[in-house]
Image (cartoon, grey):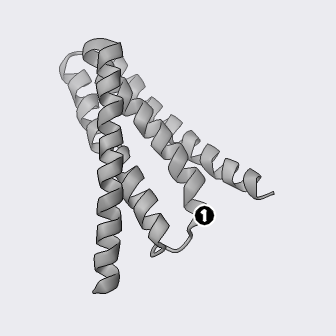
Amino acid sequence: MTEALSGFLLAGAGGFLGAGLRYLVGWFSALAGGSCGHIWATFAVNMLGSFCIGWLSPFWISPRHPMRIFVLVGVLGGFTTFSSFSADTLHLLQSGRWGWALAYAVGSVVLGLLAAGGGFALHSYMLK
């Protein structure tokens, strides 16, 4: 029970930080990008989060490692926003912006995978 509780607290503390950072990215993006700024903030956060997860996850292989729980599950889990991605895509579809919705969805998935792969590649390069 102690291990589960410490993992819960680590993930929660990291999630608090990640969600707060996500909010700030969205807030600044709305200032810069107007009414659709939050959509591109979601895109940027997901790409950055995918890269960071790819780059950092090989440092802590064990799913029980405290830093993995804090950083990957907590901070990056709170920072990345797949549920927001889904809602933003739906918003674009509902507003008749089919082309943007398609570009946003495909771009998020493809670039997210490339970003995660880039993070893994950077990690491998750093180990050499």
Q: Nearer the viewer, residue 32 or 106?
A: 32
Quarter of the N terminus within the rendering: bottom left
The answer to which quarter of the image holds residue 95 is top left
Give the secondary structure at mark 1.
helix
Q: Is residue 97 visible?
A: no
The answer to which quarter of the image holds residue 35 is top left
- Total numbered labels: 1
Q: Residue furthest left?
A: 94
Left or right: where does residue 114 sit relative to residue 21? right
Residue receiving disc 1: 59
Q: Nearer the viewer, residue 121 or 99?
A: 121
Determine whether 51 is above or below 11 in the image: above
Type of the residue with mark 1:
Phe
Left or right: where does residue 65 sit relative to residue 85? right
Determine whether 118 is above or below 24 in the image: below
Q: Residue at x 45, y 58 (%)?
A: 71
Q: Position of residue 68 (x, y in %)?
A: 47, 65
**Mark 1 residue crowding within 10 angstroms, few (<14) / some (14–19) / many (20+):** few
Q: Position of residue 52 (x, y in %)?
A: 53, 47
Q: Position of residue 53 (x, y in %)?
A: 51, 52
Quarter of the C terminus within the rendering: bottom right
Q: Residue at x 41, y 62 (%)?
A: 70
Q: Position of residue 100 (x, y in %)?
A: 35, 19
Q: Is residue 64 visible?
A: yes
Q: Residue at x 56, y 52 (%)?
A: 54
